Amino acid sequence: MKKLLSLVICFSLCFTLLPSTSFAIETNDKELEKFLQDIGWEKEAYISYLTSKGWTLEDFYSIDELGTPLSEESIQPVLIDFELTREELNALLIENGDIDKDQDVLDGEYLIFAEELYDFVDFYINGEFGTPIDEQNLQELLTKYGFASKEELEAFLINNNDSLDDYEYIEDLDYMIDLYKNGLFTDEEIFGLFDEIGLTEAEIENLLNHLEKLDFEDPTVLDRLLILSDRMIAFEEFESADELTAEQISELLSIFTELLDIFQVDIQYYLVKDGQKEQISINNLLSLQSTNGADLLLEIYSKEGQFLADILFTAEMFGSEVIKETGKDLQEAKEIIAKTADAKKTVKKPQTIQTVKGAKLPKTAANYVQNILIGTVIMIAGLFLLQRSRKKEI
């Protein structure tokens, strides 16, 4: 179950990490103001620093992604802790492609925060992300979660179809224990999201009953999910959905379609306005310049044609606090998922991407479909967590 849950979270993250202005950090964010106060930087100076590196606040979707700007002072812990000279540090970063030849660590536009510089240098030198489990940190973890012994922890993990043998780093173990005990979302958060998209209790029950009929422990299914996960990870990060090429849009929809096939559901799409609804394909949605104020209704059916649920997405919804907070919760899972991928991050600096004919895709339609995918996959993740919780209660 841990492997399956991680895959579902991974897919949710992949979709929530697709750019959306409703997720981007805003200049008046109270969390941003507290963060800047903690690191001793003024807002204007911080934004100017990001600009000088080719970044903006809109490139970040969580305060957790921000850090202390590089300076003579902030790089000192790296030089001291790893016993490096400035020249040796620069050579290490050049070797790993973080800065160009003849550049200094302070000149780079990729590693721009002291915290991530420290983590990457640690990885380059020591070759691991995380603290290996030992008797001392394991005992601290047992105490933290109230386990009387290592055996009691192992019994707890086994009850969650997991095992202590599956973990190498204490951070991973800590994360999963917390996830098993507290969940990624509370039931209130999950049902709050469902209320926003119009899912009734009867429809939730229909979807849960449908999922229970599927064998997600089948290795073939897990392999398909892993392959889809790799395909999502392979996407280069981009500034906005309108910068996707036609080929990338096609690949994204292919992944989404196969994901629905794994879940054995079909979705019919309707534009709804003034009580009238008009069926439309997801491909045609991409060609729309505007929805002209229409909402989008998704009707979900099993592969056998049984109606399961319908959900309603409105333009206003994508700026709502429910979606924003759900996105932030999913961000907390990013670190443990990232450890299953390459340790080296994909460069996040936005690039202008065009279609094969040189024209950009319609911005409004592209973002609209992107948000459809975000909401639908978050819903699926929530249903999995509810299903898992319900099985435990039986």
Image (cartoon, grey):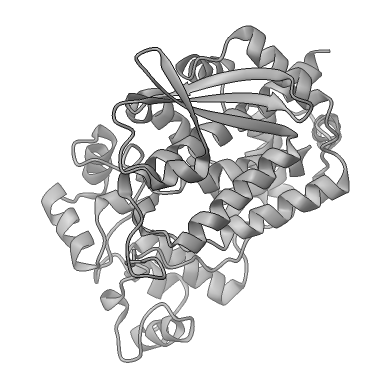
In depth, the one of 115 and 300 nearer the eye is 300
Residue displayed at 36% across by 66% down: 354
Residue displayed at 23% across by 45% down: 36
In screen coordinates, is 171 left or right of 345?
Answer: right
Position of residue 342 measured from the top left corner of the image (x, y, whole percent): 60, 66
In the rendered image, the quadrant that contains the C terminus is: top right
Image height of 14 relative to 319, above or below: below
In the rendered image, the quadrant that contains the N terminus is: top right
Position of residue 244 measured from the top left corner of the image (x, y, whole percent): 41, 59
Q: Quadrant of the rendered structure where residue 102 is?
A: bottom left
Residue displayed at 31% across by 71% down: 109
Residue 140 visible somewhere in the drawing: no
Residue 115 visible somewhere in the drawing: yes
In depth, the one of 339 and 299 nearer the eye is 299
In depth, the one of 137 and 287 nearer the eye is 287
Residue displayed at 53% across by 30% down: 269
Position of residue 89 measured from the top left corner of the image (x, y, whole percent): 40, 82
Query: In the displayed image of the protein, which residue is found farthest to the bottom?
Result: 102
In screen coordinates, is 180 left or right of 245?
Answer: right
Query: Count the marks: how many?
Result: 0
In screen coordinates, is 51 left or right of 179?
Answer: left
Q: Quadrant of the rendered structure where residue 53 is?
A: bottom left
Query: In the displayed image of the protein, which residue is found farthest to the left?
Result: 44
In screen coordinates, is 48 left or right of 15?
Answer: left
Position of residue 368 measured from the top left corner of the image (x, y, whole percent): 39, 39
